[in-house]
Amino acid sequence: MTPNLNQLSRTVYEVDVPAGKKRLQVTATQSFGQSGAFKVYVRQGSAPAVPSAVDCTADSATLPAVCSIINPVAGKAYVMVEGVGNVTSFNLRVDALTK
């Protein structure tokens, strides 16, 4: 995914987490020439409610921004990306891993 975000805008993505996975990992990066600052929030079961109801957070200050949940619950997880500054584009990858 490579969306654009305006400052203070939020986009939420719904993710299916299969049973038996050992880790849910969300990685956000920016390619050369992309700009802007953003935060990533992940929550299982329902959409993140910033700042208190999140299971994991990461931000673009240290790229790649990686959020990992160990032994995730099978079902829905939600990834929210919040623009802190105008973001020209970012790359978002979600992996449900067996290790």
Image (tube, grey):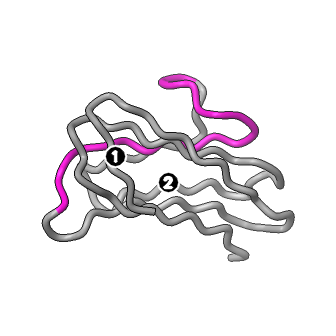
- Residue in the picture at 73% in, 75% down: 98
Could you tell me which residue is drawn at 50 percent across and 25 percent down? 50
Q: Which residue appears at 32% of the width and 38% of the height?
A: 83
Ranked by sequence position, the earlier of labels 2 and 1 is 1
- Quadrant including the C terminus: bottom right
| Marking on residue 48 | none
Q: Quadrant of residue 86?
A: top left
Q: Residues within 10 Å of mark 1 (few under 14, many from 20)?
A: many
* Residue assigned mark 2: 67
SS at circle 2: strand
Point 77% across, 67% down: residue? 21
14 or 72: nearer the viewer: 14
Which quadrant of the structure image shows residue 55? top right
Q: Number of labelled discs? A: 2
The Cα–Cα distance between marks 2 and 1, rounded to whole angstroms, is 9 Å
Q: Which amino acid, by three-letter code, is at mark 1? A: Asp
Instruction: Provide the secondary structure element on which disc 1 rests.
Output: strand
Question: For residue 59, which numbered disc appears in the image?
Answer: 1
Disc 2 residue type? Cys
Q: Main secondary structure of the magenta part?
A: loop
Residue 59, horizontal then vertical, whole percent: 34, 46
| Residue range corresponding to the magenta coloring | 34-52
Residue 17: horizontal and vertical position, in percent? 76, 59
User: Does residue 85 lie above or below 26 as drawn?
Assistant: above
Give percent across and percent down for residue 67.
49, 54
In the rendered view, does 47 fall on the left or right side of 76? left
Vertical comparison of 76 with 89: above or below: above
- Foreground of the two, 63 or 14: 14
Quick check: 43 left or right of 98? Answer: left
Identify which residue, 1 or 47, lies in the foreground.
Answer: 1
Looking at the image, the residue that sits furthest to the bottom is 99
Label 2 Cα neighbours within 10 Å, binned few <14 / some 14-19 / many ≥20: many
